[in-house]
Image (spheres, coloured by chain):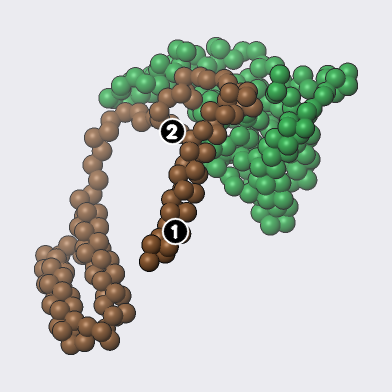
Chain colours: A green, B brown
Amino acid sequence: MEIDKRHRLHIYSDEELDKNEGEIIELLKAASQQPVPDQDEWLDEQLRRNILVTSVEILLNAARCASLWPVVCFPACCAFEFITTAASRFDISRFGMEIIRASPRQADLMITAGTLTWKNAPNVRRVYDQMAEPKWVIAMGACAISGGIFSGSYSVVPGYNRIIPVDVYVPGCPPRPEALLYGIEQLRRKISSLQFLA
Amino acid sequence: MLANYGNVGLFLVVAVLFAITTILLPVFLRYFRIVPHKPNPVKNSPYECGMETAGKTWVQFNFRYYFYALIFVALDVMVFFLYLFAVGLREIKIFGLIEIAVFVLVIAVGYIYAWKKKVLEWK
């Protein structure tokens, strides 16, 4: 991809650095005019009652549900609601999620808490690319869903689904910790019905 | 005598099995398609995580960090030796005491030299 090549350029002056960064952002912006389709095929399957999960899959899905490790991706203020969720009162360690990984290589869940600007978008895309499979994304808050109150702004990404596929949307500005926990519960439902042994 | 090494042998077997299991587990998961195979250039790159270095890497650090680090390492290792000495003091008696005094003296000379050279002052 063109953007990946640009990340590896050797740059020795600040002007070149700014120019290259701008070009990366423009490329990403041009490439993400349409939203990435949501990962919601499983809902149709559930309506059609076609889901037949084998016992091995039940076991592995249970393991995946019980140890979702979120990656650090908190560009703005929804992060505080996430921190509250992670802290003692709401305590997401009940779901096996207490380890917030600083390295995307060890994480499988991205909770996108906050407004994303186009300047930061290539970095979030890069972190998402580095995450291990299988990976999931929870878009937390109005900004993550549609850009929120900044949605008309030239500098704000109108929803994370422009750059990465989103599994669960948690509305709110910011959402209460209960709402985030409900979103996580929905994601666990999705993971429980995952079929991968063809 | 030889039977005492049985535990070591057992530990060795467990260690080797653990290493082989952890190496073969991802291969197994990939083979049975439990883990989806979706490579991309960023994921395949050897650089582990975060942003790649951009711009000049000829950044200058303040040289005084190294002075601090060197003196710290010397004293740190000395404390380590002093612990061992204190544990074995009853056995090694006055000879050990003199020897450790010489050891401390040698490091103290270096420390006082650095002090006199105003290494510990941050200007």
Residue carrying label 2: B48
Q: Residue furthest right?
A: A48
Q: Chain of mark 2?
A: B
Looking at marks 2 and 1 on the same chain, the residue that comes earlier in the sequence is marked by 1
Residue at 45% from the left image edge and 44% from the top image edge: B16
Image x and y of residue A185, in percent: 77, 39
Identify which residue, B123 or A96, lies in the foreground. Answer: A96
Q: Indicate the quadrant containing the C terminus of chain B: top left, top right, bottom left or bottom right.
A: bottom left
How packed mark 2 is, by other alpha carbons closer than 10 Å (few <14, some 14-19, many 20 or more), is some
Q: Position of residue A8 (x, y in %)?
A: 37, 21
For the residue labelled by badge 1, is the local secondary structure a helix, a strand or a loop?
helix
Chain at numbered mark 1: B
Q: Which amino acid lies under the numbered mark 2 shown in the image of this protein? A: Glu
Quadrant containing the N terminus of chain B is bottom left
Query: Which residue is the site of mark 1?
Result: B6
Q: Is residue A128 above or below residue A20?
A: below
Q: Is residue A103 left or right of residue A169?
A: left
For residue B98, above or below residue A51: below
Dot 2 falls on a residue whose secondary structure is loop
Residue in the picture at 71% in, 19% down: A198
| Place of residue A42 in the rendered image (x, y in percent of width and height, measured from the top left) | 78, 22
Residue at x 46%, y 34% (from the top left corner): B49
Residues at marks 2 and 1 touching, judged by CB atoms closer than 8 Å: no
